[in-house]
Image (cartoon, rainbow, N blue to C red):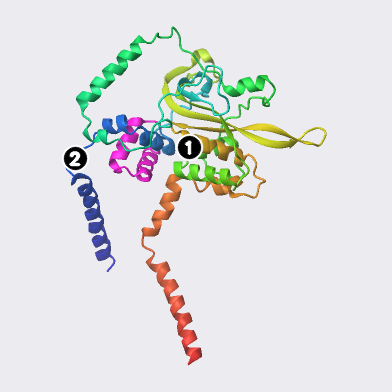
Amino acid sequence: MGYVPVKGGTQAIDASIQRIKFERLKGQEIIEVETIMSTMRGMVDQVMSESSLYSPYLAALAIKQAEGSMEEAVFLMRAHRSTLPRPYYSQTVEPEKMFVERRISASFKDIPGGQLLGATYDYTHRLLDFTLIEENLEDNLQWLQNYQDQLKQIEALDEVSYFPKVVDYLREEGLFETYKADNTPPIDVTKRSLQFPTTRSERLQVLTRGQTGAVTSLGYASLRGYGQVHPTVGEVRVGFVPIYVQHPNEMEPRDEDEYYIGEIKVTEVESFVPTNVKNENNEYELEFEIGYGICYGQNETKAIAMSILDQCLQHPESGFPTHDEEFVLLHIDSVESTGFISHLKLPHYVTFQSKLDSIRQVKKGVQTVES
């Protein structure tokens, strides 16, 4: 008796999978992986960030396979990531050495090195561009040629310029506290489950791979008053940072034995959060603390929200949910949250029938008493 429903279920599942492919192909159009990489940067960056796997090509492939479903694409990338070997841990990345494409500050009009607007939709009109319906490759190539000609007319720099951190100048004025570098090796949350209370390295890892909408939503909740953090963005920088690994035969890290293996594009945010602290005279005075956010690709809203939650979780004594690390960290993971909700679609026949039986018995007992 058990064989028939299992066999029938298998056939139904096979038919469902065939239907998925039909829905993707019935429009008789094919979108290339390279096309997704070139034209859907935001989706690619978001998938890479939430999956903790930096590969624009694989992210684009996952988006194609998932038909644009972000949660499914992240699930695919996480699953693939779990199969990959990890021969090395990279050396600590230094954001000060970032090759900056975009760098702004909401705290100061004039910052050392100047503001660099870069590529962003922040200054565009949020109106539908109907000319995109009729765009063609020939016109696009011509526009690209004209733009590149304009760039060639700009005097090139003789050397790469690194932009200083805004907060460093404030530290020099004594406006921000300077902390001793903590070189404690971070705990890899992909190899060890979270143990509460967490370390800051664990919190930052979970936040940076958190679901973009969830991180943004909780950051917004804190801004609205469900928390005590309302920062000013000190600096947003988007650009490429070099990645180095240690020489495999060297036990102690040395700069001359490091190997450059490539670069990754990241968004980094430092937010300035006002706090009231007691001084030596037991009087409250205003100080600033820093909330930190960083994630793959150009993902500025998430990085800003992450900096808010980072600061929230550094003050767990608050009674607000955004300051509760268990509440925040256990509910922002894309695969965990969507997977658990999606499991409700799976068969719950036995448990539901037991509940129905209980209700029937109660109602039957009530009817007997009333009779």
Residue lying farthest to the bottom in this orientation = 371
Q: CA distance from mark 1 to mark 2?
A: 33 Å
Tell me what residue is drawn at x 57 percent, y 46 percent. Answer: 224
Q: Which residue is mark 2?
A: 29
Rendered-image quadrant of the N terminus: bottom left
The stretch drawn in magenta includes residue 220:
no
**Left or right: 151 in relation to 256:** left
Amino acid type at circle 1 is Lys
Up/down of 259 relative to 75, above or below: above
The residue stretch that appears in magenta = 54-83
Residue 43 in the image: x percent, y percent? 36, 37
Q: Quadrant of residue 73?
A: top left
Tell me what residue is drawn at x 38 percent, y 11 percent. Answer: 154
Up/down of 128 relative to 38, above or below: below
- Number of residues whose C-alpha sits closer than 10 Å to that of mark 2, classed few (under 14), some (14–19) or many (20 or more): few
Query: Mark 1 falls on what kind of element?
Result: helix
Q: Which residue is mark 1?
A: 302
**Left or right: 279 in relation to 316:** right
Q: Are marks 1 and 2 in contact (CB under 8 Å)?
A: no
Regarding residue 366, the answer to whether it shows in the image is yes
Residue sitting nearer the eye, 36 or 286: 286
**Left or right: 279 in relation to 121:** right
